[in-house]
């Protein structure tokens, strides 16, 4: 079979032209209007001129506004139409607002809803824009913490039996506990079939007598 | 029952906070300098610049770094007309209506702004602005008639009450110059011209008139009149590019200093002991030359003279200069020189360049990632395996030799490692993972840069003033994988002025010209491509189709290799696409017209092509199909010749329509099409493997949407496995899955990640006008979203809007100004793709769409592993010892 290998490359006569998103021509009137508003800085922002880092883009940069020292901004020379006003801050998120200017120069500001474009939730004009939240850019690295490790059920399952194995024999060496155990064994010897309740009461009374050892008390509780 | 909660698709792509700057960098640029002024008033010394890119910025005087920067609109509404520094930085921007703004020079915060619109809109482009005594003066010449002068209060914009009309019938277009507050023209009949000047701010109209013959020879004169460069303090201008005339006490005064060179840039600066004429030009023999003469005496100031043969500053222009006297009565000068190649240099007296900025990089038009060659040692090892002949002893001795050299370099590197630290630039050799590459950037001004991708440092630069980079293409014709041949890169552009083809071939590693070197064709080019088959020097030939439909093959010897080649030429404005077949007829290659497609209906329908996008050459497709939940396979339609055309045009019913057409460029067959009503196309699309995505603005709903097309052959293969795809023998049309999603931002560029073998997932990269570069996994764009994937994978639920959250942002809070293009290239590691975003800023990072499955995590704790291993070994031996002792004790019992 004749292999048909065709190579076609890109057109060199093309260069990409960046076109800003323009508003439809029919809505452009002759009058020029100004969009006004005020941006409130994020509250927990460290000191510094936040106004320099913050930009106001109208329709994705078709008009650009800058913020004055007090947070107010004006976007001049905007023909009537519908505009999305975005506040761009590198660290904080602001909600965009759609501003509509009709041919008579009346302003209406509403929430941007790209999905239900006909839904109108009005917001006050002149715009007052507050930071919504901080952008979450980064993943949080999982850190190794002792508590996480210890409270892991697998670890608890391993550690507890280990405690019993390692510590109980040590307790056996303790003379007081030995005494207790002896008593128990004596009791057991005295009555061949001791009742459980009897055994426990004797143990408790013995435990109460030796308040000094807290570890022992715990041990008793565990046995319960 | 099988649990359906297992997801293989990990959709979080963001990095950890401690990885900031680890494998990404950002370089901020401002563009070619239009105006500049030193701000020596405030404590932190700065240079305030306004640029052709509509950027206002403050540069640190010591380092040249950007202190603050404001990016205005890229359209004419952002054009900066004036930069003046009073106690505030004053700018006038826009083109009727104008905006006057005042900025705080230390912080860059806006202080006041007001708008100004002129009634006379046609003449508005001739407006001249300047600031004088806290007044903004606007002058509008109506040539041959009068001058309109208006004064405004600088901070409030209040007009001082009137616009004065000064009669000036002597004004002529293009022979006038403004040297505030004087407006000067050369007027009169040829041979008896007069030099007429007027102070436009004075109350009384007072003309200064002298015959031109007093200053220059009117017979030979043709240089015209020009203002001196830089922010002059004294009204002065040059006549005929030879003489400098200044206006003093309402009189012309010719300086005794002549202009040193016809192309010299002349500036007048104020110094402690009187004003000085500063001139800078590029001398053919002496290199960069700068001279300074005192205005009063005409004597040269030797301490300011510079001649430097090694300094290459084409077409230097003194943008601004400042001189002060230091404590020890020495002149301390800072001269900002902007150059024809868009670079900026800050020079001090004596010619030492304090810093340079390559502002050409603010306008990158083409990018190519180039592989680095292997080190000499690795090359020697590889060549060892190539040599098959020779006895076993010869091979053994070679083995020993290479091993010895390896040992030597190891010892050397250890010795060197003790001496110097990481300051030394890493050698330009391929690293183990293939992450180190050279980025070749072609800029709008015609300067080509070679950049280290890891550090962003410029390795070499090549400036060709004759290169017109409109529609420029870059081809890697030979990679560095073929020693002893060098890597070979070719830039195909146009010549300035004529539009004829211009070909620059260079070695991308060193930046030196090789092969065809600089080749100026005497014909305009229509289309160019690379021959897919290399010749015996491993070089891919360049195939050029010129305006007369002749084909040139470079090098000529490769012409017999042309076989089964197809080309297309698309006309942007008429949406006509012409296909060609290239055939070698024994002597030369001919282009035969094969097919013609008129996109968007008839020829007069007014459609125009917004995007024409084929597949990347040499693209690999890893899996030929997709596994469906029922275990059957849906085969992809992978046609290497498929080209996506996005056209837009008027429609009688729906205003504007956007049509996406997939055309097989070898046969001319239309494979799939999709139209969108009441929409306008955006020039961004992606096209890889079997899927395509493109962007358009939906006028009806006033939102940007991204539409995707996926092409499938169906559940059976059309061709047997392994057979090459043939465009000419496939009659069937693929089935198309379509979907469109809403984007909540305004995209400015789109691309997909590219990996070595295409095993890794593909993610779509979008740059938004807000300055973010977001990574969108392809699963979010798939038509089957919301359904079940193969093998229990749960796909993201269907939602009309694409998530573009903070965690999808590759450049976190490093916002980019005007991102324009995204370029992705594969790394040697399969998991990783290298991404460069160009625009006003450059941002480089690397992304791993399926996570770095072939690399240890970078937070891998080598220390812990070592400690644990060491501990275990220690424990083993100690327990062995104790066990033996116990055994001994027991034996004694």
Image: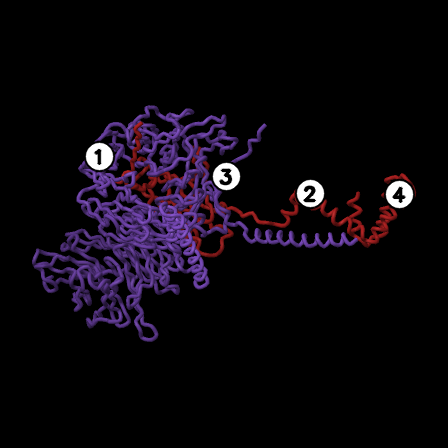
Chain colours: A red, B purple
Question: Which circle, 4 or 3, is nearer the viewer?
Answer: 4
Labels 2 and 4 share a subunit: yes
Q: Residues within 10 Å of mark 1 (few under 14, many from 20)?
A: some
Marked residue chain, label 2:
A
Labels 2 and 1 share a subunit: no
Kindly report the distance in space between the C-alpha atoms of the residues bearing marks 2 and 3: 32 Å
Query: What residue is rendered at 31% in x and 27% in y?
Result: A1
Kindly report the distance in space between the C-alpha atoms of the residues bearing marks 1 and 3: 51 Å
Viewer-side residue, B125 vs A224: A224
- The residue to which callout 4 is attached is A188
Q: In this rendering, does residue B187 appear at all?
A: yes
**In the image, B459: left or right of B167?**
right
Q: Residues within 10 Å of mark 3 (few under 14, many from 20)?
A: few
Mark identifier at residue B584? 1
Kindly report the distance in space between the C-alpha atoms of the residues bearing marks 2 and 1: 79 Å
Of labels 1 and 3, earlier in sequence is 3
**In the image, B523: left or right of B751?**
left
- The residue to which callout 3 is attached is B10
Q: Secondary structure at mark 3?
A: loop
Relative to B537, say whether B579 is above or below: above
Relative to B390, say whether B424 is above or below: below
Q: Quadrant of residue B326?
A: bottom left
Q: Secondary structure at mark 4?
A: helix
Marks 1 and 4: CB-CB under 8 Å?
no
Percent position of residue B493, x then y: 24, 45
Labels 4 and 3 share a subunit: no
Percent position of residue B676, x then y: 35, 30
Marked residue chain, label 4:
A
Question: Which circle, 2 or 1, is nearer the viewer?
Answer: 1
């Amino acid at each position: 079979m004749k292999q048909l290998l065709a190579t076609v490359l890109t057109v060199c006569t093309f260069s990409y032209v960046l076109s800003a998103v323009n508003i439809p021509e029919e809505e452009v009137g002759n009058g020029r209007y100004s969009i006004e508003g005020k941006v409130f800085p994020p509250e927990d922002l460290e000191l510094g001129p936040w106004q320099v880092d913050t930009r106001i883009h109208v329709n994705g940069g078709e008009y650009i506004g800058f913020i004055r020292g007090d947070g107010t901004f004006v976007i001049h020379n905007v023909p009537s139409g519908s505009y999305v006003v975005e506040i761009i801050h590198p660290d904080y998120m602001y909600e965009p607002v759609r501003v509509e200017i009709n041919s008579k120069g009346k302003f209406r500001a509403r929430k941007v809803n790209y999905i239900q474009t006909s839904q109108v939730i009005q917001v006050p004009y002149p715009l007052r824009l507050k930071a919504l939240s901080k952008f979450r850019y980064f993943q949080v690295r999982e850190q190794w913490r002792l508590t996480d490790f210890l409270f892991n059920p697998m670890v608890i399952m391993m550690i507890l039996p280990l405690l019993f194995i390692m510590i109980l024999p040590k307790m056996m060496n303790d003379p007081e506990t030995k005494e207790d155990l002896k008593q128990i064994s004596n009791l057991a010897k005295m009555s061949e079939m001791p009742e459980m309740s009897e055994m426990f009461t004797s143990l408790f009374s013995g435990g109460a007598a030796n308040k000094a050892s807290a570890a022992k008390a715990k041990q008793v509780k565990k046995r319960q | 029952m099988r649990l359906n909660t297992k997801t293989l698709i990990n959709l979080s792509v963001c990095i950890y906070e401690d990885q900031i700057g680890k494998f990404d960098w950002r370089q901020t640029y401002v563009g070619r300098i239009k105006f500049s002024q030193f701000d020596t008033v405030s404590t932190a010394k700065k240079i305030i610049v306004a640029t052709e890119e509509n950027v206002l910025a403050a540069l640190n005087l010591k380092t040249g770094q950007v202190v603050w920067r404001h990016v205005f609109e890229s359209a004419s509404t952002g054009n900066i007309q004036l930069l003046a520094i009073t106690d505030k930085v004053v700018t006038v921007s826009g083109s009727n209506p104008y905006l006057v703004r005042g900025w705080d020079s230390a912080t860059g915060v806006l202080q006041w702004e007001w708008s100004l619109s002129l009634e006379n809109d046609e003449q508005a482009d001739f407006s001249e602005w300047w600031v004088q005594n806290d007044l903004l003066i606007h002058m509008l010449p109506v040539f041959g008639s009068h001058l309109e002068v208006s004064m405004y209060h600088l901070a409030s914009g209040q007009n001082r009450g009137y616009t004065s009309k000064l009669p000036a019938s002597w004004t002529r277009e293009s022979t006038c110059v403004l040297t505030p507050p004087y407006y000067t023209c050369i007027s009169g009949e040829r041979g008896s011209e007069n030099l007429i000047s007027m102070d436009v701010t004075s109350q009384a109209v007072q003309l200064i008139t002298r015959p031109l013959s007093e200053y220059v020879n009117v017979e030979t004169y043709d240089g015209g009149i020009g203002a001196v460069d830089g922010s002059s303090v004294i009204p002065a201008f040059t006549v005929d590019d030879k003489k400098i005339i200044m206006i003093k006490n309402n009189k012309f005064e010719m300086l005794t200093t002549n202009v040193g060179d016809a192309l010299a840039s002349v500036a007048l600066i104020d110094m402690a002991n009187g004003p000085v004429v500063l001139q800078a030009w590029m001398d053919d023999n002496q290199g960069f030359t700068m001279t300074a003469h005192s205005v009063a005496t005409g004597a040269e100031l030797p301490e300011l003279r510079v001649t430097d043969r090694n300094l290459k500053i084409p077409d230097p222009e003194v943008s601004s200069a400042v001189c002060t006297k230091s404590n020890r009565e020495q002149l301390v000068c800072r001269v900002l020189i902007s150059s024809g190649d868009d670079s900026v240099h800050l020079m001090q007296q004596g010619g030492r360049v304090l810093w340079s900025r390559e502002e050409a990089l603010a306008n990158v038009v083409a990018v190519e990632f180039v592989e680095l060659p292997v080190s000499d040692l690795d090359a020697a090892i590889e060549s060892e395996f190539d040599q098959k002949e020779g006895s076993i002893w010869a091979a053994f001795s070679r083995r020993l030799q290479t091993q010895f050299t390896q040992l030597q370099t190891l010892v050397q590197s250890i010795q060197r490692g003790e001496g110097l630290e990481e300051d030394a630039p890493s050698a330009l050799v391929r690293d183990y993972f293939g992450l180190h590459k050279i980025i070749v950037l072609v800029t709008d001004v015609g300067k080509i840069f070679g950049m280290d991708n890891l550090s962003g440092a410029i390795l070499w630069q090549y400036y060709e003033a004759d290169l017109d980079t409109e529609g420029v293409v870059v081809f890697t014709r030979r990679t560095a994988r073929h020693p002893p041949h060098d890597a070979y890169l070719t830039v195909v552009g146009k010549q300035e002025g004529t539009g004829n083809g211009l070909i620059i071939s260079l070695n991308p590693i060193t930046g030196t010209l090789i092969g065809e070197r600089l080749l100026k064709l005497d014909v305009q080019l229509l289309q160019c491509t690379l021959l897919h088959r290399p010749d015996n020097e491993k070089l891919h030939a360049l195939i050029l189709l010129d305006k007369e439909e002749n084909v040139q093959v470079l090098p000529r010897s490769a012409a017999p290799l042309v076989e089964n080649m197809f080309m297309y030429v698309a006309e942007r404005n008429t949406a006509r696409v012409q296909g060609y077949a290239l055939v070698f007829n024994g002597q030369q290659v001919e282009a035969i017209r094969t097919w013609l497609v008129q996109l968007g209906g008839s020829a007069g329908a007014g459609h125009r092509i917004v995007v024409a996008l084929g597949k990347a050459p040499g693209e690999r497709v890893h899996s030929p199909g997709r596994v469906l939940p029922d275990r059957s396979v849906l085969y992809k339609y992978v046609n290497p010749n498929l080209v996506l055309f996005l056209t837009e045009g008027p429609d009688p019913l729906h205003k504007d329509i956007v049509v996406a057409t997939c055309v097989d460029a070898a046969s001319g067959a239309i494979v799939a099409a999709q139209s969108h009503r009441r929409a306008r196309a955006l020039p961004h699309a992606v096209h890889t493997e079997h899927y395509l995505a493109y962007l358009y603005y939906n006028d009806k709903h006033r939102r940007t949407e991204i539409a995707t097309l996926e092409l499938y052959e169906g559940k059976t293969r059309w061709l047997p496995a392994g057979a090459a795809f043939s465009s000419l023998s496939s009659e069937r049309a693929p089935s198309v899955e379509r979907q469109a999603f809403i984007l909540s931002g305004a995209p400015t560029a789109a691309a997909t990640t590219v990996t070595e073998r295409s095993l890794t997932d593909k993610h779509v990269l979008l740059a938004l006008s807000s300055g973010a570069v977001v990574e969108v996994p392809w699963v979010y764009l798939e038509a089957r979203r919301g359904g079940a994937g193969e093998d229990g994978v749960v796909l993201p639920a269907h939602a009309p809007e694409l998530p573009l959250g903070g965690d999808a942002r590759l450049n976190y809070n490093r916002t980019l100004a005007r991102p324009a293009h995204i370029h992705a290239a594969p790394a040697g590691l399969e998991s990783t793709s290298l991404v460069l975003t160009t625009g006003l800023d450059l941002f480089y990072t690397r992304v791993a769409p399926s996570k770095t499955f072939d690399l240890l995590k970078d937070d891998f704790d080598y220390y812990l592993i070592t400690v644990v291993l060491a501990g275990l070994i220690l424990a083993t031996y100690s327990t062995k010892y104790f066990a033996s002792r116990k055994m001994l004790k027991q034996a004694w019992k």
